[in-house]
Amino acid sequence: MTHTSTAPSPAQVSLAWTAAREAAFEAGRAAALDPIVAPLSACDGATLAEDLRPRTDLPAFPTSSVDGYAVRGPQPWRITGRVLAGDRADEIGADGTGVEIATGAMVPADAEAILRVEDATHADGAVRGTPRPEREWRMPGDEAARGDVLVPAGTPVTPAVIGLAAASGHDDLRVRPRPKAVLLVFGDELLTAGAPAAGRIRDSLGPQLPSWLRRLGVDMATPGVIGPIEDTLDAHVAAIRDALASGVDLILTTGGTMHGPVDHLHPSLEEIGAEYAVNTVEVRPGFPMLLASVPRPDGGATLLAGLPGNPQSAVVALVSLVVPALLGLTGRRLPHFPTIELGAAIPGRGGYTHLALVRRSSDDRAYPLGHAASSMLRGLAQAVGFALIPPHGQGSAGDRVPLVPLPLLLGEHP
């Protein structure tokens, strides 16, 4: 089929930056991944789809906190046995007796005290010493009672959460899996190797965006980056359809988000029947960005994020639209941004939100970076994130402003 690029572009309904972020989050929630039950070994980076609760009290039985002797009655105590971690403890029995006990071992039900090994003396086949006044064992439920909410649904699964789940008696968890994504790189002008020359430039987004996405808890498809894709409508439509057929949860594209003679993303989305969640954002840099729901052959829909071709603008689109969409897609919460004190003034951008690249100095304040034009990466390479200057506002030294962080792990901030 032959296409032309003369079809009218969809109407642009430019959204304020905060509204666009919320719209992207809601689009992600509408396409949220179905929960699965996965073994603990496969849960790292997924998202809890239900509250994590212990299957028993934690600890499940009285547990010694120290190495020593569990005793009852007056001293001296005749030691009649030993309880190690993993043993089932019998009662001590008679007053004036005790058992040697190891850290983590079950405490006999009739023990009255535990004497630390370093506080004990041995004479005439018996043990003497003064137990410390504090209880030297953990009681059932000290950490949690059976059924308590340990970690709420919507929390990223970290190694610590996996360890807590195992300690709570779980072999698997109900989670929303890590999303799978593919990146489509548009642009005849792009080189994938060597130095820029003769009117052609190096593609810097194909190499960097997968690394940002992995920090956001995304798994890249195989292949994860496709392109550069020819600057024709046919090639754009074919690439998007192939990505849809591959079963990914998120498609990212770079370039073509404007309406120039070789900008084919909007006509491609019209051809495929996409519905826009966001179409242009009132933010500088990076305003020609978009997020759309694209129908799949199986009747479902996949999110497509159109990032500008300028490198810094593409990263602005990543933190503005892709991050909140992923939070919704995985059932996580849309967090508030941390704030940071400005060490120098940052101008506003009129009626646009200004996301200004900043570095954090040794005085723990944020300073604007140079080399921060849309096409530049030098400033980005030194940045901790973007200072958020609201429309019709500006930042002065000493002001505390929101910090939109560059991706570390989804939901975390520097």
Image (cartoon, rainbow, N blue to C red):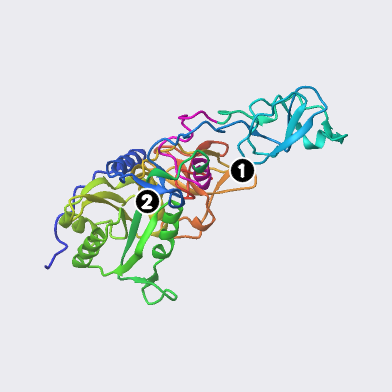
Q: Of 167 and 228, which appears nearest the observer?
A: 167
Q: Position of residue 257 (x, y in %)?
A: 28, 56
Residue pushed farthest right? 123
In this picture, residue 300 sits left or right of residue 253: left
Q: Position of residue 340 (x, y in %)?
A: 54, 39
Residue that label 1 marks: 364
Asked if residue 396 can be seen in this view, the reply is: no
- Which residue range is magenta in the image? 144-165
Q: Residue at x 23, y 47 (%)?
A: 276
Return the disc, 1 or 2, that comes first in the chain's sequence: 2
Name the quadrant containing residue 30: top left
- Judge whether 275 appears above or below 60 on screen: below
Element carrying mark 2 = helix
Residue 156 part of the magenta-drawn span: yes
In this picture, residue 303 sits left or right of residue 220: left
Mark 1, residues whose alpha carbon is within 10 Å: few (<14), some, or many (≥20)?
few
Q: Position of residue 38 (x, y in %)?
A: 39, 48
Quarter placement of the N terminus: bottom left
Secondary structure mainly formed by the magenta segment: loop
Q: Residue at x 68, y 35 (%)?
A: 65
Q: Residue at x 85, y 34 (%)?
A: 121
Residue that label 2 marks: 317
Q: Position of residue 133 (x, y in %)?
A: 75, 24
Name the quadrant containing residue 64: top right
Residue 171 part of the magenta-drawn span: no
Identify which amino acid the numbered label 2 is placed on.
Answer: Ala
Quarter placement of the C terminus: top right
Asked if residue 91 can be seen in this view, the reply is: yes
- Judge whether 325 appears above or below 239 on screen: above
Q: Are marks 1 and 2 in contact (CB under 8 Å)?
A: no
